[in-house]
Image: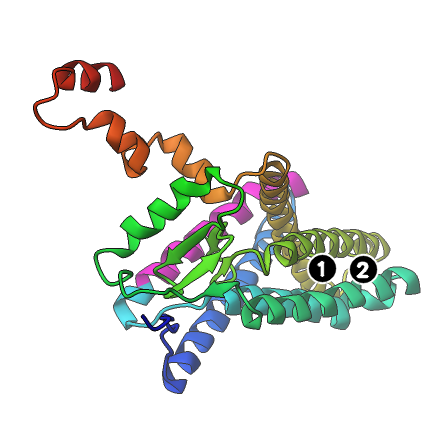
Amino acid sequence: MLGLRFPRPKRSPLELLRSTLFSCSLVLFSQFALALVPWLFPFISFLAMLPIAALIILVTILLGRFLRRRLGVSASAPALVLFNVLFMWGVYVTIIRKAIPSLLDAVLNAVCALLLYGLYRILSGDLGTVSHSSSTLESGQNEFVTLNVQCEQSSPTLPRVRYCKSCKASIKGFDNHCPAFGNCIGNKNHRLLIVLLAGFLIAESSYTMSSTKFLTKTADAQRIESILANSLVISTMLFCILQVLCQVLFLIWHIYCICFNIKSEQWVNLMQINWKRCPEFQHMLEPQPGSPLEGDQVGHSI
């Protein structure tokens, strides 16, 4: 049989443009809404602003979902990540950079540039897509066949190949479908994902340090321009700290999975205790009709 590939569905340029503009609007709305927190609540501490900032981000997510259904346009997760990085970098270059030592300035600019390159690589690089030697992976059979492959993973010579319905492709070494990057994580880009997570942590931590230095130097400034600039710096600091908290958990999670040689999706399936999805458990739970141990085996298995 001819090898089959399942090409990823392509959207028209107009759809891509609408999605990009919608994503950019959401980023600008969320960032300027965050800037209102220090402007409206200058009397509360920075730590007290964190839950308010988290609530604003949650409201923005819910608003984005509502508008997506009403307007019939979807946001692009990679575009959201990209515009947030560009917004943070833009605030740094235009406001914070003048108060930062040259070494820290070089580190932050280099990390931001590498992040943009890493985003490009994880979006455009090879996922580890494989071809199939038969036409059995058609609608209604994809999950059955790929689950068989998953359960045969007890042999180290067999590759783990899973079919992703979002990417319309079968991925060798499939770990998970990453919503943030809108792409699958497999053998070819798993290391890049770890590097990107570490890069985001370094960039956002460096940005927080730079923002702290800037705010310390401009603490006594009372001009309206300084107040507006400080509000924008504080809001992006809030966003970065919330991002760091989430990304630390994701990084620890992936390191844990690497140390125990387990894929993210496998761990989730194990936690769900969905035994019937694997053929060997089906055989144990569903004996042949007429077997004298039929009722007993099923009862003990369950």
- Alpha-carbon span between mark 2 and mark 1: 10 Å
Q: Is residue 52 magenta?
A: yes
Q: Which residues are magenta?
A: 46-66
Q: Determine if residue 45 is in view.
A: no
Q: Residues within 10 Å of mark 2 (few under 14, many from 20)?
A: few
Between 74 and 265, the residue placed more toward the observer is 265
Would residue 2 appear left or right of 219 to someone viewing this image?
Answer: left
Disc 2 marks a residue whose amino acid type is Ala
The quadrant where residue 166 appears: bottom left
User: Which mark is first along the chain, 1 or 2?
Assistant: 2
Q: Identify the residue under disc 1.
A: 230
Between 6 and 249, the residue placed more toward the observer is 6
Q: Is residue 199 magenta?
A: no
- Mark number displayed over residue 221: 2
Would residue 67 appear left or right of 267 to someone viewing this image?
Answer: left
Residue 237 x/y as whole percent: 68, 53
Question: Is the Cβ of the residue at disc 2 closer than 8 Å to that at disc 1?
Answer: yes
| Residue in the image at 51% along x and 43% along y | 263
Q: Determine if residue 103 is in view.
A: yes
